[in-house]
Image (cartoon, rainbow, N blue to C red):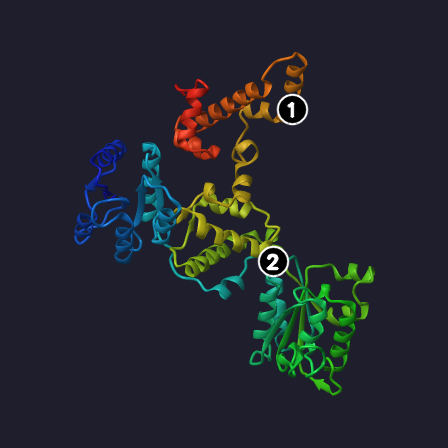
Amino acid sequence: MKPVWIVDDDQSIRWVLEKALARVSIDVQSFESAAAVLEALEEATPSVLVTDVRMPGQDGLSLLQAIKQRHPELAVIVMTAFTDLDSTVSAFQKGAFDYLAKPFDVNEAVDLIRRAAQEQSAPAPASPITGDATLMQSASLAMQDVFRAIGRLATSRATVLVTGESGTGKELIARALHIHSARADGPFIALNTAAIPRDLLEAELFGHERGAFTGATTLRRGRFEAAHGGTLFLDEIGDMPLELQTRLLRVLAEGSFYRVGGSQAVSVDVRIVAATHQPLEQRVAQGQFREDLFHRLNVIRLRLPPLRERKEDIPALARLFLERSARSLAVPARRLTPGALQALIAFDYPGNIRQLENFCHWLSVMSAGQVVDVNDLPPEISALAAGPNGRPADAPRTDEQAQAAIEPDWAALLERQVRNRLAHGEPAVMSTLTRDFERILLRAALVHSHGRRAEAAQRLGIGRNTLTRKCQELGLEET
């Protein structure tokens, strides 16, 4: 492993980090200025660079920017006593691996440097992947059936109804039907019928003549005309108003329509692919969807399975979305540890593929380093991975955890305590119980963090100085 470089004009900081890293057998090279580091980079590179922000001459943020231009993959940790929002954001915008606020816990600093070094040495993905190719590949048997259906429909003009939960990729399948059809050279026009106000939807679909209504100053062609010779994808068809369902049925039956305010029929050659997440049979039974239109649309039905039924596809999809997010944000692509990947696979994704994509974008923005572990995952997933009481989902319960699981609700116990103390005339009940409550919180957090006060304060959501002051006030100085 290459040595870690420390850049700080404060000799005491350099000494502390040198000794701490030496204890864990990590070689260190120290520098007093940014200029000395830039000169040394002409000959060698470190495994990790740790730099102060406020230094004489060139500061740490400009050093960070210069290093990222020459060595974009080098992990740089920025440390400063000036923990304001602007400098923190600026550090991350310039590509910092993480931000270390002074005064820092030495053990935490060593852990952070180790993590940065591990990610620096982790192998990069073998090759770039293309979005559509990955989204249209699947090891799922249900998706294989969908792909085979698309192949059989290549030469057909049949109307297709795509069903599936929100976020399963219905528009992607509609595009694939278009691309693999004889209409591939024609336009693909998509319209989400649920996203257009009902009083505008008719004109959006069929267009309008000049003067048809207030504001219609010119002739406007609708989506049907725009899709002539190609495919019109009508998403969320189950939300279409009944009066427009009648007009749509007539277009499907006759191949022509009238623009709003028009008197001349417009003929079009359009293939319809409709999609919905709603059970249309149920909406027909409820009188909310025309039965004749349902049968007109339901010529060929393709059901897209939810992501929880095709979990074998999650690794490839996650990699795709992480690379997409990295490109859009101009940051290095995040990589998942085996544990993080298993946690992603275990999640049920009520929002399906769209939710997985959102998670991956969240990771690209919020994770401190390039390698993502379980603790770095969004709260919805990390909580599931941790299981009840903060333990791993597959870990056996300790006696303490088992006892906690069967104890009555703590709020009920607190209410009972308050009532009992008030009944016995105890003075200053709120003050006493507040001190007890804070003492329990602080003690538990310090035990959890093995006495590391900076971590305990961070987990409790308070400042380290606040934690120290409260420990003194509550008699926890020796904790």
Mark 2 and mark 1: Cα distance apart in space:
40 Å
Q: Amino acid at mark 1?
A: Pro
Front residue of 277 and 104:
104
> Compared with residue 31, is residue 477 higher up or lower down, i.e. above or below?
above
Res 424 quadrant in image: top right
Quadrant of the image containing the N terminus: top left
Q: Amino acid at mark 2?
A: Gly
Q: Is residue 55 visible?
A: yes
> Where is residue 323 shown, x and y percent of the image?
43, 58
- The residue sitting at 21% across, 45% down in the picture is 56
Residue ID for mark 2? 167
Residue ID for mark 1? 408
Res 201 quadrant in image: bottom right
- The residue sitting at 59% across, 22% down in the picture is 403
Label located before the other in sequence (2 or 1): 2
> Compared with residue 196, is residue 250 higher up or lower down, i.e. above or below?
below
Q: Secondary structure at mark 1?
A: loop
Is 290 positioned to the left or the right of 420 in the image? right
